[in-house]
């Protein structure tokens, strides 16, 4: 019989999402719904930090449908920590555009519920359920600004290509089941160890399954949806997509590769190394040519996924610990960057590279926060981004993939170029006549949550850059217990 304490966080998120939906349907204001959403997420953090539950849920045969380990628990805590500031970003953005609807928070919590299932999955069936529960709210949220063609286009592209990835995943799982007669990770590991299976059928099935996960991560060459979706979606939704689903998908990928596919490491490790190198190079180089800041951050996301994959390629506890460290720092940095971008949008500033010209003179505080966050994203010490890259490159060299670490360092130099380019634009360029005269804020009273989130992100990346042990002392022990 399953211990329901293991499922309490997932059940709580689902129930709280329904409570928020009913509250909004019966006349609750969107602003109050936002407060209730943040309160629920913060309340859930307490038992997860004080009494983390470990074990397996729905045990069937040799394995279980869901497994909760220190690695899973820490990933879920990081998801909650990132979800709270993203929920705070939604209200000032949508309220300023008179498009604030309470269902945005229900969708966020349902997507988060899917991520919790995804991170704990030990069977292909809950893996698929979690992936779809995570993705469908994202499709809807991308279209929340219904009067903007860009938002609808982003949602349509994301839905069509996401549906294609889901179809590939189901086809792959079907082939794996046909070859092995099981969908459980543990049983699949045993079957692979025994051999004697139809290898062509199984290899195609496993490849399609992994490719579907790589699509969700925006790994090159499965990345082309990312710039259009990031640019067209509402900015808080873009922040949500940039920070949270990537963390959940990487945790699933690590557990998949180090679990049932651990015996095939000599096959997937070099292939993943090539994809990581391609993502780092393509994302960093193409970002230089962008003029829209959100589109630039989309290509930066592709590059950062490549950096994260370096830790996965290392295939060691140090590498997996570095993955969690990197994702936490990257997520907080992206949330802070998007908080500043929303503030600029509410101030009716153009959110383009050339529109940032002279920002340091017009909005010195915003320019300073943007500078610090960009430096962290570029990996400049003493910010946390530097330690994040070091924590994935060092295990990579120890694993014998020095060439990939060299590619990563070179890609980091290119990434530093476009970060410094934005800094140079803000501090040294002269704004055009259209940008020089900036309109007043849409709603000045709505800007305090944005400043709070941005300042908190800056503070965290500074503290973790100086004292990385505060986080690495949690990530490394968790990475030694993946299952």
Image: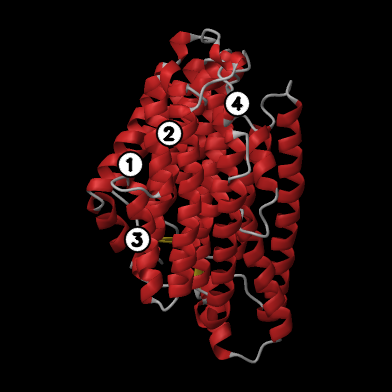
Can you say whether 201 is above or below 308 in the image?
below
Quarter of the N terminus within the rendering: bottom left
- For disc 2, the marked residue is 336
For mark 4, what is the residue? Answer: 103
Q: Could you give the CA–CA distance between mark 2 and mark 3, rounded to whole angstroms?
A: 22 Å
Question: Which residue position holds label 1?
Answer: 461
- Mark 3 neighbour density, 10 Å: few (under 14) some (14–19) many (20 or more): many
Does any portion of residue 476 appear in the rendered image?
A: yes
Q: Earlier in the sequence, mark 4 or mark 1?
A: 4
Circle 2: element type: helix
Residue 102 occupies quadrant: top right
Give the distance between the C-alpha atoms of the residues marked 1 and 3, in whole angstroms: 15 Å
Q: Earlier in the sequence, mark 2 or mark 3?
A: 2
Question: Measured from the top left, where is residue 123 in percent x and y?
Answer: 56, 65
Q: Residues within 10 Å of mark 2 (few under 14, many from 20)?
A: many
Between residues 178 and 112, which one lies in front from this camera angle?
112
For residue 445, what is the image quadrant? top left
- The answer to which quarter of the image holds residue 298 is top right
For mark 4, give the secondary structure. Answer: helix
Q: Residue at x 34, y 34 (%)?
A: 458
Element assignment for label 3? helix
Circle 3 residue: 391
Q: Are marks 2 and 1 in contact (CB under 8 Å)?
A: yes
């Amino acid at each position: 019989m399953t211990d329901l304490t293991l499922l309490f966080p997932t059940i709580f998120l689902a129930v709280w999402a329904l409570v928020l939906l009913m509250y909004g349907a019966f006349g609750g204001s969107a602003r109050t719904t936002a407060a209730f959403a943040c309160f629920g997420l913060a309340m859930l953090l307490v038992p997860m930090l004080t009494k983390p539950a470990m074990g397996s849920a729905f045990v069937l045969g040799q394995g279980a449908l869901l497994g909760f380990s220190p690695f899973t628990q820490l990933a879920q805590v990081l998801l909650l920590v990132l979800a709270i500031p993203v929920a705070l970003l939604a209200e000032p953005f949508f309220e300023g555009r008179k498009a604030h609807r309470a269902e945005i928070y229900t969708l966020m919590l349902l997507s988060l519920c899917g991520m919790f299932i995804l991170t704990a999955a030990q069977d292909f069936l809950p893996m698929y359920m979690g992936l779809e529960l995570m993705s469908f709210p994202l499709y809807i949220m991308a279209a929340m600004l219904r009067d903007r063609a860009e938002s609808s286009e982003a949602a349509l592209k994301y839905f069509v290509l996401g549906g294609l990835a889901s179809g590939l995943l189901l086809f792959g799982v079907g082939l794996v089941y046909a070859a092995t007669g099981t969908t459980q990770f543990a049983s699949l590991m045993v079957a692979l160890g025994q051999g004697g299976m139809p290898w062509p059928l199984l290899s195609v099935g496993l490849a399609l399954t992994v490719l579907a996960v790589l699509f969700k991560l925006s790994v090159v060459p499965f990345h082309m949806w990312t710039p259009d979706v990031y640019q067209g979606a509402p900015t808080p939704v873009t922040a949500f997509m940039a920070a949270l689903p990537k963390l959940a998908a990487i945790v699933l990928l690590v557990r998949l590769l180090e679990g049932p596919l651990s015996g095939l490491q000599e096959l997937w490790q070099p292939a993943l190394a090539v994809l990581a190198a391609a993502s780092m190079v393509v994302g960093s180089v193409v970002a230089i040519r962008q003029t829209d800041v959100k589109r630039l951050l989309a290509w930066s996301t592709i590059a950062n996924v490549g950096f994260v994959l370096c830790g996965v390629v290392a295939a060691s506890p140090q590498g997996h610990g570095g993955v969690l460290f990197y994702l936490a720092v990257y997520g907080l940095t992206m949330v802070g960057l998007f908080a500043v971008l929303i503030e600029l949008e509410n101030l009716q500033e153009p959110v383009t590279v050339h529109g940032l010209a002279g920002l340091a003179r017009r909005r010195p505080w915003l320019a300073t926060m943007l500078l610090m966050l960009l430096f962290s994203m570029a990996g400049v010490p003493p910010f946390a981004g530097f330690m994040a890259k070091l924590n994935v490159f060092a295990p990579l060299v120890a694993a014998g993939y020095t060439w990939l670490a060299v590619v990563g360092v070179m890609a980091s130099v290119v990434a530093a170029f476009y970060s410094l380019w934005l800094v140079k634009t803000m501090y040294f360029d002269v704004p055009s006549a259209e940008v020089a005269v900036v309109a007043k804020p849409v709603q000045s009273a709505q800007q305090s949550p944005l400043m709070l989130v941005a300042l908190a992100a800056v503070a965290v990346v500074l503290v973790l850059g100086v004292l990385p042990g505060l986080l690495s002392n949690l990530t490394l022990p968790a990475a030694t217990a993946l299952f």
